[in-house]
Image (cartoon, rainbow, N blue to C red):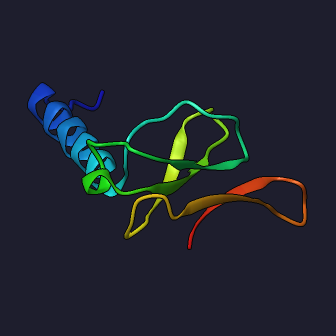
Amino acid sequence: MKFISLTTVIITAAAMTDMASAAGGPDITCTPGYGWCALDYASYNNGNDFAFGCGSNGHSDSWTPCSCKGCCKVIVTSDGFTKGVCE
């Protein structure tokens, strides 16, 4: 029987959590497969707009910070989905 110490498990879990939060933006509930814009979201990107994509789990999974306020637009892609873009 293989033994793994509880300390190793806790440290590994903590490291994985830090990587996930450092790599992404805010967790936003959304429609899977679509992209959107977030405006006036003060706690991320210094309050500037950002575009985000929605993963299959119904939560944001990619973020594109814009450099201004009011410059993120939602467009319809050729396959009928939406996508947020910074202009």
Q: Residue at x 62, y 34 (%)?
A: 30
Direction left: furthest residue: 7
Location of residue 50 in the rendering, given as x and y in whole percent from the top left corner: 46, 57
The quarter of the image holding the N terminus is top left
Location of residue 52 in the rendering, given as x and y in whole percent from the top left corner: 54, 52
Location of residue 66 in the rendering, given as x and y in whole percent from the top left corner: 43, 66
Task: Name the foreground residue: 84 vs 40.
Answer: 40
Q: In which quarter of the image is residue 58?
A: top right
Direction bottom: furthest residue: 87
- Where is 35 relative to 59, above or below? below
Task: Name the foreground residue: 22 vs 2.
Answer: 22
Q: Which residue is drawn at 62% across and 60% down?
A: 73
Q: Residue at x 73, y 46 (%)?
A: 33
Task: Name the foreground residue: 38 vs 79.
Answer: 38
Q: Is residue 9 left or right of residue 84?
A: left
Q: In which quarter of the image is residue 77?
A: bottom right
Q: In this view, does 76 lie to the left or right of 57?
A: right
The quarter of the image holding the C terminus is bottom right
Q: Which residue is drawn at 20% across and 33% down?
A: 9
